[in-house]
DNA sequence: AGAGTCTTCCAAAGCGCTTTGGCTTTTTTG
DNA sequence: CAAAAAAGCCAAAGCGCTTTGGAAGACTCT
């Protein structure tokens, strides 16, 4: 059942039927009702390929997925996707993942824009002066950045959490508890979120005349193993920290294991605060010692970004407004006063 | 730059240019070279929307993503995606995720097929007599199932791992080590993979005249917390098992925590074998006691499924061939002889 | 040399929708 | 009541590609 047939059986022109269906004003309400009715009864659905060709609208949002044998997709992605998908569903949007060589995403961005394959894109895990953001901005396709870049000479729309604030609060709490030597086990510091977190910790320390020692900060891929290694290194050297801030629950698993392997305890010997993106399958309250966390649901972020993308596509949202969400600091058993 | 312009500047018809580009035989090799050359030089890329409308081919593979506030996407998904994406990239395929109400995926499958939105789809986490498989089969779109259904009255193409064999081997090893009371902490037993794993354990036990006690098997969502709870329950009741087989590394985290909380040890009091899908961020050898596992890379499965989908799209693969991959049993420190 | 066969190319007809420009008919207005 | 404005509808021209059905020219064969 296509438009032509439908129009024919209604004894109307395709024009009128099309307009009736798409809510244009120049059609009699009575006629519109007839058309709508017939369309529903015959289960008429406009062919998206044809519509695409005519309008350029696709009803899809895009994401360029970096891939490669040595590239690991962040497990957070799946939670983000849950939120994004949940919202997208209610608005009949699909998501297209365009896999790209991690070292050459530009080609893919250009392709999906040139081919009008999607109505909007989002960018995640931005870095300072992120080229993708600059590219997408000049290409002129609607977009939202999940997170923030830095040092770009233009504004852009983003949704981010207050990473600096979160880690500032976490560090401040630890300092108030008497800790003087803090350590930060961070994610890849080429990404802005990690930079912001480090900044937050440093700021809190500085406010008390303290510093984050060169050897007390490390930036690694957020795996359990890296959390373990970093912690071993930190605690086995001289000048060991009495408190650790950690950028992910997964790394925190490794931290806990390392502390235990060394015959130390949390929070007796070491206090620990980790960032929690809120996974259903790994919860901080279920750690052997319930983990204090800076908490922010990445799922909610996914839903919000879908919402903003939809708004931009339909022209409801414009401009370069960035939004920053506050982060909860949830205190549980893994923090205590500094050991004497 | 579109076909018309390109044809005009080559003083050829659109037909010829199109055919030259698409490798049809009825065009002079000399002419083809000229065309190919000009196309490359001017960066001509056929408009996919137009091509879609004309041919029905989309260059995309589809996946219906169950969503909903209470629906959690499996964290395995992201690893699967890595493999899928890596292969898809090399074949210029995109992946479109169509979010659907978890309780009504049928509508979405029908939509993407009726609208010709993708060239092929894959189905994951199949259940016995899975309706999605039956639906997709009748709709006539190329597809591959990741995993297996059961009790369908037709054959279909799938790629699965030998879950039954894997857990059979694991249980057999435990039995040989003298264990008599095994327990299975399984995933959702409405899914075929879980059924197969249970079957494998039962078969191994039966071979030695043993049984899997009613209370020694549990099926839950594969979270850390559920692993913990199941283990507490198993070990605190009478008739506690001396060995546990566990369907995921994430649950195994909970198992280990529970054992420790009870003042017991692995493998002294309890032996443990878990299934490992091979995550980069959580590795069995890094558990406090290195974990024995049945191992099978879900990433490889993703790549394989992309490969088969591509083959089916281009007509290279046909029929309903199912393939079952063997699973490695990797023995590490978490298993030992049964306590006296 | 005329008939038959390839080879190489083209004009034009879709694919199914949106949208421009215009034509009637009805309603409003001074 | 005539002129102007508004309402309601339509024919046809795209959107950019593929593919059908020829046609012209070059070659082979008897």
Image: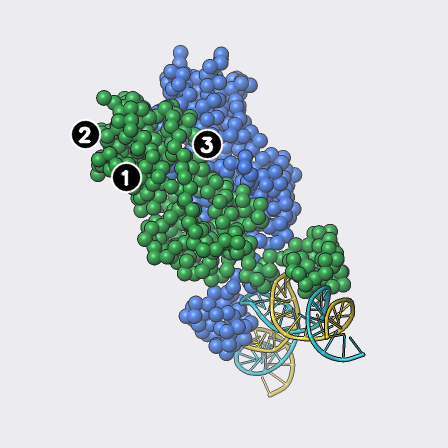
Chain colours: A blue, B green, C cyan, D yellow
Q: Say the numbered circle drawn on residue B203.
A: 1
Disc 1 to disc 3, how far (Cα)?
Answer: 33 Å
Which element type, helix, strand or loop, lies under badge 1? helix
The chain to which mark 3 is attached is: B
The chain to which mark 1 is attached is: B
- Out of A65 and A338, give the one closest to the viewer: A65
Q: Is tag 3's residue or tag 2's residue first in the polypeptide sequence?
A: 2
- Please state the horizontal and vertical placement of residue A153, each as a whole percent of the image: 65, 39
- Please state the horizontal and vertical placement of residue A87, each as a whole percent of the image: 44, 50
- Out of A303 and A211, give the one closest to the viewer: A303
* Any part of residue A336 in sight: no
**Is the N terminus of chain B in the top left, top right, bottom left or bottom right quadrant?**
bottom right
Q: Say the numbered circle drawn on residue B281.
A: 3
Mark 3 and mark 2 in contact? Answer it, CB < 8 Å. no
- Please state the horizontal and vertical placement of residue C14, each as a whole percent of the image: 58, 70
Q: Alpha-carbon neighbours of circle 2 within 10 Å: few (<14), some, or many (≥20)?
A: few
Q: Say the numbered circle drawn on residue B238.
A: 2
- Out of B204 and B23, give the one closest to the viewer: B204
Determine the image quadrant of residue B326.
top left
Q: Is residue A295 above or below residue D7?
A: above
Do discs 2 and 1 belong to a common subunit?
Answer: yes
Do discs 3 and 2 belong to a common subunit?
Answer: yes
């Amino acid at each position: 059942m296509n438009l032509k047939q439908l129009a024919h059986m209604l004894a109307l022109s395709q024009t009128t039927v099309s307009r009736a269906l798409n809510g244009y004003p120049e059609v009699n309400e009575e006629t519109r009702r007839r058309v709508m009715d017939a369309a529903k009864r015959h289960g008429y659905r406009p062919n998206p390929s044809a519509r695409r060709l005519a309008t350029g609208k696709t009803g899809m949002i895009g994401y360029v997925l970096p891939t490669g044998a040595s590239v690991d997709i962040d497990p957070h992605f799946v939670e983000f996707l849950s939120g994004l998908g949940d919202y997208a569903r209610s608005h009949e949007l699909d998501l297209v993942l365009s896999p790209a060589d991690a070292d050459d995403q530009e080609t893919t961005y250009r392709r999906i824009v040139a081919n009008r394959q999607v109505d909007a894109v989002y960018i995640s895990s931005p870095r300072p002066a992120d080229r993708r953001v600059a590219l997408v901005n000049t290409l002129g396709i609607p977009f939202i950045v999940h997170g923030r870049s830095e040092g770009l000479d233009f504004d852009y729309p983003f949704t981010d959490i207050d990473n600096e604030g979160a880690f500032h609060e976490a560090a401040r709490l630890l300092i108030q508890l008497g800790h003087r030597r803090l350590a930060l086990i961070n994610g890849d510091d080429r990404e802005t979120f990690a930079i912001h977190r480090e900044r937050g910790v440093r700021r809190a320390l500085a406010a008390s005349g303290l510093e984050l020692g060169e050897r007390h900060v490390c930036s690694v891929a957020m795996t359990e193993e890296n959390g373990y290694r970093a912690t071993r290194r930190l605690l086995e050297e001289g000048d060991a920290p009495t408190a650790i801030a950690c950028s992910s629950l997964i790394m925190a698993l490794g931290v806990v294991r390392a502390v235990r392997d060394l015959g130390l305890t949390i929070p007796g010997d070491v206090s620990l605060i980790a960032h929690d993106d809120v996974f259903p399958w790994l919860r901080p309250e279920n750690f052997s010692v319930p983990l204090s966390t800076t908490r922010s649901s990445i799922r909610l972020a996914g839903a919000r970004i879908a919402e903003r993308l939809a708004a931009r596509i339909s022209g409801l949202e414009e401009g370069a407004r960035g939004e920053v969400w506050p982060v909860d600091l949830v205190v549980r058993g893994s923090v205590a006063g500094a050991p004497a």
